[in-house]
Each structure stands twice: as C-alpha cells, then as structure tokens.
Image: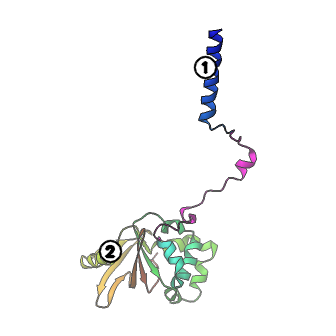
Amino acid sequence: MKKINLTISFLALLALIMVSCNGGEKKPEATETQTETAPAAQGQSTVIDTVSAANALQVAKSLDDFKTLVVAIEAAGVEDALVNAGPLTVFAPVNGAFDKLPAGTVEDLLKPENKSKLAFILKNHVAPANYPEKQLKKEAEKGRDLYMASGKYLTVEAKEDGIYVGGAKILKTVQVSNGWIHVIDNVLVPAE
C-alpha cells in the first residue's frame, strides 16, 4: 500500500511540475491561416521609433527643404541605407538644388525604369564614414577626396566662403543619430 501511495504521490508531483512549467496554458497549434497571414519582411526604415534620437532619414522627412530628396529616396528604394547604424555622412541637396537640374531631369529619374540610375545618384550623396565639418576641413587641407557609397570619389575643398564637396557648398550641418547631414546647394550627379 505504501508503494502505491508513493507512486501516486510521485505521479501527482510530476504532473504538477509539468503544468507549472508551461503555465498551465495550452499553446495554440500552428494553422495554415497563421502561416499565410505572417507579415512580410520589411526593412529597417519601417520601424517606428519615437524614443531614440532621429536618424538621417527621419530628419530629412521632417523638413520641408528636403521634400524632393525624400521623394527621390523613396522612388529609388534606398530608405534603409539612411537608417543604418552608421556612421554615415549624407550630403543632402535642398529642393532648390533639384530645380537647378535641366528641365524634366527629376521627373525622368523618378520613373520606375530609372530606379537603379536614381539609386546610383543618391548613393553619390552618402559617405560611409563619419565626417563632421571639422573633419571635412582637415580632409580639404590634406587634399583628400571622400569615398562615396556609389564607389565614386568627391573632392572636398575649403574656400573663403565655406566648405565644398564635389563642387556643392555646404550650407548647414546637422548631427543625427547615425552620423551627419550636410545640407548642400547642388545635386552631386556623378560622371558615368
């Protein structure tokens, strides 16, 4: 009798432990519907973060001066590149810089068939490095060119009226969570 009571007690204790470990909850079984409705993978730029400091894309989207640039970034599908941890330096043309391009250029670049060409041009505005204004001045003094994400190089120059990169004047500099934005007055179209 003792042996039966001990066995029953042991089984009861084992059952109690098993129920405790899974919280007593029955887990739902995977169904076809759950698999079909799983969200599609999306890029880092779709993450909503209202706690961290703003990254380059968030800052660009928040300012009217960059409406054309943001439209181009979205049309080229390069949003995720601007939200990466960095450091990166973005030379961001203002709306007026796009207006300086020959008539019809922006409209033509925004066409789906020109997506890769537009992405190449936009990558020519991003240096995968940390270049605050002070560092740009040092690079200019040393006569160095900046390597851009497009694979091209841009000349940085210190002139009496400011710093120029690829012939575009830096109008303002803003630090962002993943690097720097240098506001420029021209679009940096690389020679192909």
Amino acid carrying mark 1 in the image: Phe
- Count neighbours of disc 2 (C-alpha within 10 A) and say few if under 14, some if 14 to 19, many if 20 or more: some
> How many circles with numbers are drawn on the protein?
2
- Count neighbours of disc 1 (C-alpha within 10 A) and say few if under 14, some if 14 to 19, many if 20 or more: few
Tag 1 secondary structure: helix
Residue 185 appears left or right of 46? left
Residue 111 appears left or right of 147? right
Q: Is 131 rendered above or below residue 98? A: above
For this rendering, which residue is in front, 137 or 28? 28
Residue at (64, 14) in percent of width and height: 5
Relative image position of residue 129 (x, y in whole percent): 37, 67
Disc 2 designates what residue?
145
Q: CA distance from mark 1 to mark 2?
A: 76 Å
Residue at (42, 65) in percent of width and height: 86
Whether the magenta-drawn stretch holds residue 36 is answered as: yes
Amino acid carrying mark 2 in the image: Asp
- Residue extending farthest to the left is 142
Tag 2 secondary structure: strand
Residue at (75, 48) in percent of width and height: 33
Q: Is 132 rendered above or below residue 5? A: below
Q: Are marks 1 and 2 in contact (CB under 8 Å)?
A: no
Q: Quadrant of residue 32?
A: top right
Magenta span of residues: 26-54
- Frontmost of labels 1 and 2 is 1
Relative image position of residue 159 (x, y in whole percent): 29, 88
Whether the magenta-drawn stretch holds residue 31 is answered as: yes
Q: Earlier in the sequence, mark 1 or mark 2?
A: 1
Disc 1 designates what residue?
10
Q: Give the prevailing secondary structure in the magenta stretch.
A: loop
Q: Is 59 rendered above or below residue 2? A: below
